[in-house]
Amino acid sequence: RVLKPGGKFLLIEDAPTRNKLNFVGKLGQKYDRGANIRPAEFYAEKISRVFDLKKYYPMRSGCWDYTVFVGVK
C-alpha cells in the first residue's frame, strides 16, 4: 500500500539463535513477550507471496540474531 511498484524494501526480523553457546540470546528469546520468533524460511515464504524477494541473510547485533530481507514491490 505504501511502497510504489518497483520500490525496494529492507526488513529486519528477529531470528532464532544460531550459536548454541549464545546463552544470553537464547534466554532473551525464551522470554520474548510475543513468542513469535520464527525461522527465516517462514518469513521468506510469506514475503514472496506479495513481493519479489531478492535475497535474505542472517546478521547479529550483540547477542541477538536477525534475518535481513531485501525485496522489490
Image (cartoon, rainbow, N blue to C red):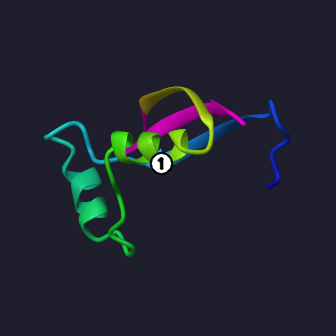
Of residues 28 and 36, the one nearer the viewer is: 36
Residue 64 belongs to magenta span: yes
Residue 63: x, y in percent?
Answer: 35, 45
Residue at the image point whose x is 44% and y is 38% from the top: 67
* Figure check: 10 above or below 35: above
> Identity of the amino acid at label 1?
Lys
Q: Which residues, given as a range, are shown in magenta?
A: 59-73
Of residues 48 and 22, the one nearer the viewer is: 48
**Most frequent secondary structure within the magenta stretch:** strand
Left or right, 24 with respect to 12, comes to left
Choose top left, top right, bottom left or bottom right for residue 21. top left
Residue 54: x, y in percent?
Answer: 57, 24
Residue at the image point whose x is 31% and y is 46% from the top: 39
Residue at the image point whose x is 43% and y is 42% from the top: 45
Q: What is the quadrant of the C terminus in the image?
A: top right
Residue 35 belongs to magenta span: no
